[in-house]
Image: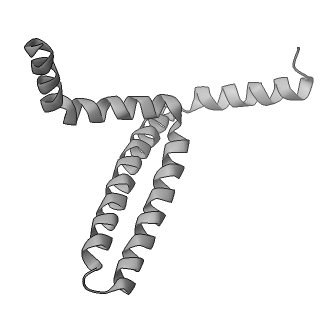
Amino acid sequence: MPLSEDEQRILRQIEEQLQRDPSFGRDMHHRRASSRRSVLLTGVAALACLALSIILLSVSPYLSFVAFIGAVIAVVFAERHARALGEAGLTHLSESVRSRLGGASNARHTRNQNDR
């Protein structure tokens, strides 16, 4: 389906702006890296708040509830960042986390397969 004159004009304007701004690609890359970092940080924050919530149960149920609400808020932010990152970014994120944390588990997995 051909583009209308207005759509073609808008497309030309966007192309001209992209040609004038060579840092556009770098800016997009930094946003993506920042988003992966945000997903990891909010996930860690959620786990920390959950652990704090369990620890605070012995001190005060009210403080524990506040920590639990913090965990819920952190999970909501993690989900928002994950949606912004998209499926390809999440796949890359999970692979990078596995490579960092999975070094020992990969060695165990290989050892278990060799034992069979």
Residue positioned 30% across, 79% down in the render: 57
| Residue 105, image x, y percentages | 17, 30
| Residue 40, image x, y percentages | 35, 48
Q: Residue pushed farthest front?
A: 116
Q: Nearer the viewer, residue 43 or 62?
A: 62
Quadrant assignment, res 102 = top left
Q: Nearer the viewer, residue 48 or 86?
A: 48
Quadrant assignment, res 4 = top right
Left or right: 58 with respect to 30?
left
| Residue 82, image x, y percentages | 49, 44
In the rendered image, which quarter contains the N terminus?
Answer: top right
Residue positioned 43% across, 61% down in the render: 74
| Residue 62, image x, y percentages | 39, 86
In the rendered image, which quarter contains the C terminus?
Answer: top left
Residue 43, placed above or below residue 15: below
Residue positioned 37% across, 60% down in the render: 46
Quadrant assignment, res 100 = top left
Colour mapping used in the image: one colour
Residue positioned 34% across, 60% down in the render: 45
Left or right: 59 with respect to 3?
left
Total number of numbered labels? Answer: 0
